[in-house]
Image (cartoon, grey):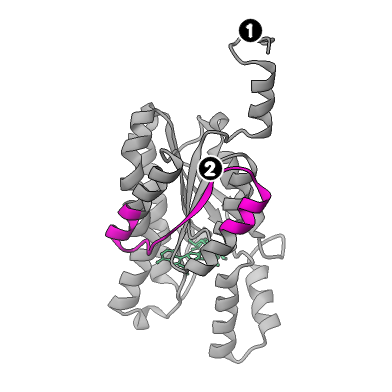
């Protein structure tokens, strides 16, 4: 095929880059078995990335992998692991790289929110929220960053929350962890700025997933209000008066993962209908 552009890119190469802009990249998505993580996995696979999805529930992982494999032609595999366990994180990242090549995109998405008034936020709840929502991202990043620096390319995308940008009552531990994730993002972005490794956070508002269903169930059981009322209260926080959809978060992640987003680093991008600005 003739190089029509004079840049060393052939016409078919240019078409490939348009159709599969993440072709040749290997993305790892933690918590990729459902909700926001599954939507991110699907979007990255649609853009041509090879994919590893991490989570604890093996059956859920197998399910999402077989769905995505049927739809997209790129290599996709599950790596069961609890991201709060350093040995499991290391083994999963090594197995992922061994099966699908060096990891060039890491999406730290695994997380959960548990609520309690501060006076009932005991040490166990505090530690659980920090370990899952913050320390796990530190551990996953430590495993993959040296390879990204050596390769001269990397994209690290941390799924924080609007709770990383503002306070909400009754979730002090979750808010502290998500604020910490944004601090990690900003500091590491400066450390890797000269190495073509970008580090960004995506901050969803209340999004329609099982996590939000659990939040609604919790409001219902603690206040006796109806599920519709509880849902309306969460949606009312968003100026668009609705819950965010997982695919909307996935679009922001995909954009940050693209090679063309190289100048965007250290940012916290809210996907929240204008709730934070
Ligand atoms: P879900 O509960 O729907 O999914 C969570 C995912 O994380 C699952 O795949 C789960 O798999 C995985 N996970 C949980 N704990 C672990 C663990 N210890 N090790 C490995 N994987 C784990 O949550 P969402 O999709 O709603 O949330 C995804 C991220 O988005 C979280 O970080 C959350 O804080 C953030 N977020 C969510 C918002 C929302 O309104 N839904 C708003 C703002 C941010 P398994 O249980 O099998 O391990």
**Measured from the top left, where is residue 10 in percent x and y?**
65, 15
In the picture, the disc for residue 178 is none
Q: Are marks 2 and 1 in contact (CB under 8 Å)?
A: no
**Measured from the top left, where is residue 9 in percent x and y?**
61, 15
**Measured from the top left, where is residue 52 in percent x and y?**
48, 50
The foreground one among 197 and 45 is 45
Q: Please report whichever mark, 2 or 1, sits nearer to the chain's N-terminal start.
A: 1
Which residue: 72% across, 60% down?
Answer: 240
What number of labels is visible? 2
What span is in magenta?
Answer: 65-91
Secondary element at tag 1? loop
**Measured from the top left, where is residue 125 in percent x and y?**
35, 76
| Mark 2 or 1: the one toward you | 2
Q: Residue furthest bottom?
A: 224
In the image, residue 214 sits, relative to residue 15, either above or below, namely below
Secondary element at tag 2? strand
Which residue: 50% across, 30% down?
Answer: 262
Q: Is residue 254 left or right of residue 129?
A: right
In the image, residue 113 sits, relative to residue 274, either above or below, namely below
Residue 238 in sight from this viewpoint: yes
In the picture, the disc for residue 50 is 2
Residue that numbered label 1 is attached to: 6
Q: Quadrant of residue 16?
A: top right
Looking at the rendered image, the quarter that the N terminus falls into is: top right
Which residue: 57% across, 34% down?
Answer: 23
Q: Residue furthest top?
A: 6
């Amino acid at each position: 095929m003739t190089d029509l552009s004079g840049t060393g890119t052939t016409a078919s190469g240019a078409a490939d880059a348009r159709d599969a802009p993440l072709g040749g990249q290997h993305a790892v998505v933690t918590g990729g078995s459902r909700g926001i993580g599954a939507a991110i996995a699907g979007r990255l696979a649609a853009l041509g990335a090879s994919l590893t999805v991490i989570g604890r529930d093996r059956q859920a992982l197998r399910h999402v992998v077989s769905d995505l494999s049927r739809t997209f032609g790129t290599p996709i595999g599950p790596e069961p692991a609890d991201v709060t366990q350093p040995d499991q994180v290391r083994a999963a990242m090594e197995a992922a790289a061994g099966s699908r090549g060096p990891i060039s995109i890491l999406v730290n998405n695994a997380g959960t929110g548990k609520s309690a008034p501060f006076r009932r936020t005991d040490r166990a709840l505090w530690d659980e929220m920090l370990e899952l929502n913050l320390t796990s991202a530190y551990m996953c990043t430590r495993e993959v960053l040296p390879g990204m620096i050596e390769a001269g390319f990397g994209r690290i995308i941390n799924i924080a929350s609007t709770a990383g940008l503002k306070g909400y009552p009754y979730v002090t531990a979750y808010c502290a962890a998500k604020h910490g994730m944004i601090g990690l993002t900003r500091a590491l972005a400066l450390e890797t700025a000269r190495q073509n490794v970008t580090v960004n956070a995506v901050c969803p508002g209340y999004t329609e997933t099982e996590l939000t269903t659990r939040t609604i169930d919790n409001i219902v059981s603690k206040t006796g209000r109806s599920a519709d009322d509880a849902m309306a209260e969460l949606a009312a926080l968003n100026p668009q008066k609705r819950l965010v959809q997982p695919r909307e978060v996935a679009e922001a992640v995909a954009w940050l993962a693209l090679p063309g987003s190289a100048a965007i680093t250290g940012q916290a991008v809210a996907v929240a209908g204008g709730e934070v600005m």
